[in-house]
Amino acid sequence: MGTNYIHEDVGGGVPLKMWTRGVPVEDEAKRQLTNAARLPIVYPHIAAMPDVHFGIGATVGSVIPTLKAIIPAAVGVDIGCGMMAAKTTLRAEDLPDNLAPLRSAIERAVPHGRQPGSRDPGAWQKPPGSVNTAWSQLEPEFTELCRDYPKLAKTNHIQHLGTLGTGNHFIEVCLDEEGFVWFMLHSGSRGVGNFIGTMFIELAKQDALRQNANLPDRDLAYFEEGSRYFGDYVRAVGWAQKFAAINREVMMKRVIEAAKTVIHKHFQSHVEAVNCHHNYVSREHHFGKDVYVTRKGAVSAKAGQLGIIPGSMGARSYIVRGKGHPESFESCSHGAGRVMSRGEAKRRFTLADHRAATEGVECRKDKDVLDETPAAYKDIDAVMEAQRDQVDVVHTLKQVVCVKG
């Protein structure tokens, strides 16, 4: 196995192994990684993916393995956020010349963004029957969680199931290298996952204060096995990850149904399908020990396992097959990774810049999506080159329609 990573020792902590050759890494992101490396629970090192950048709580694009403990802020609040892609039997020539009706049909089918007359991003006013059916897989465990944490019942749990959200969440229609049509989307556990993440991050901080824990950063407060909230957090985060996966399945079904109202040729939709998290925690075995692996903005890339690495609104995306690189804890990047904040992107780029960068893509070209313009992200080709020892490219996708949250 190649050694395409950069090894850095951290005084008073475990080493950093960073797959960042040829891509920029902010000083703030490096500081966050170093802080995490100094926690006594981390074993045996931290892996940084090529899309690594500063994040709230912990670095986005990091893989943090911990012994008998979990850091809720390293998992974050968009628990289970991830990608789903489905290859169809449609070809490029089967798509209409004007893609605007296809985009509109998808936008009508999947609540997204901030809906008119609602303070809540893209919630159903009344969930349709298909959502109620999907919720039945989640409801029993949710009811149990609500017994211990009653405020959970007041979240938009079922109202957000099958909805996209805002920010960098998206739905795309793409073409692969052979001209086949794919549908792809990016979303997570929505408001209920955010509530779970926020609540347990705060509980971990309160625990750390009570115990006078010496933390390099308060955001790195953690629950140890056997502590008061550890078991509850594991249950809640596992449920939120299940919600996120089902959420993507519900949306994909509705996207395909919407496409069939515009594309009248009969087609099959799940010729190849991938549904993967990139913000989550998983119990795994690495370097001789059972550890909790937290991937915040990273994808599992076990040998032979398929994953999705999306580019920005105007760049290519990749369906990849993992090589099972042990030093990266069998992981790869979750995307291109931001090179600047949303505020800086809005200050730096004009609508003309954005229109030029998204030429040929049927998508929003207004000021409210400037923070998602392609130039706000790292070069996806440089990111892919930096992790060539972690994944092989199976398909290269180029979007022709993009619906933004």
Image (tube, grey):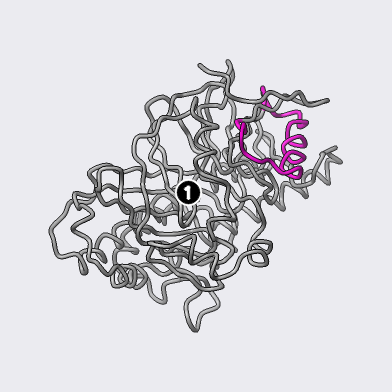
Residue 286 vertical position relative to residue 121 in the rendered view, above or below: above
Say which of 130 and 369 sits in front.
369
Residue 269 vertical position relative to residue 167 in the rendered view, above or below: above
What percent of the width, then of the height, locates residue 178? 25, 43
Look at the image and give the residue range highlighted in magenta.
Answer: 19-45
Q: Is residue 114 left or right of residue 34?
A: left
The residue lying furthest to the bottom in this view is: 117
Q: Is residue 354 left or right of residue 219?
A: left
Question: Label 1 amino acid?
Answer: Gly
User: Residue at point 36% right, 62% down?
Assistant: 401
- Asked if the magenta segment contains residue 42, the reply would be yes
What percent of the width, then of the height, locates residue 14? 73, 24
What percent of the width, then of the height, locates residue 162? 39, 62
- Asked if the magenta segment contains residue 84, the reply would be no
Image-quadrant location for residue 158: bottom left
How many residues crowd around disc 1 within 10 Å: few (fewer than 14), some, or many (20 or more)?
A: many
User: Residue at point 41% right, 30% down?
Assistant: 392
Q: Is residue 215 left or right of residue 19?
A: right
User: Residue at point 56% right, 27% down?
Assistant: 328
Residue receiving disc 1: 311
Dot 1: element = loop
User: Residue at point 53% right, 21% down?
Assistant: 326
What percent of the width, then of the height, locates residue 277? 47, 44
Say which of 344 and 43 sits in front.
344
Residue 237 vertical position relative to residue 214 in the rendered view, above or below: below
Image-quadrant location for residue 67: top right
Say which of 391 and 379 sits in front.
379
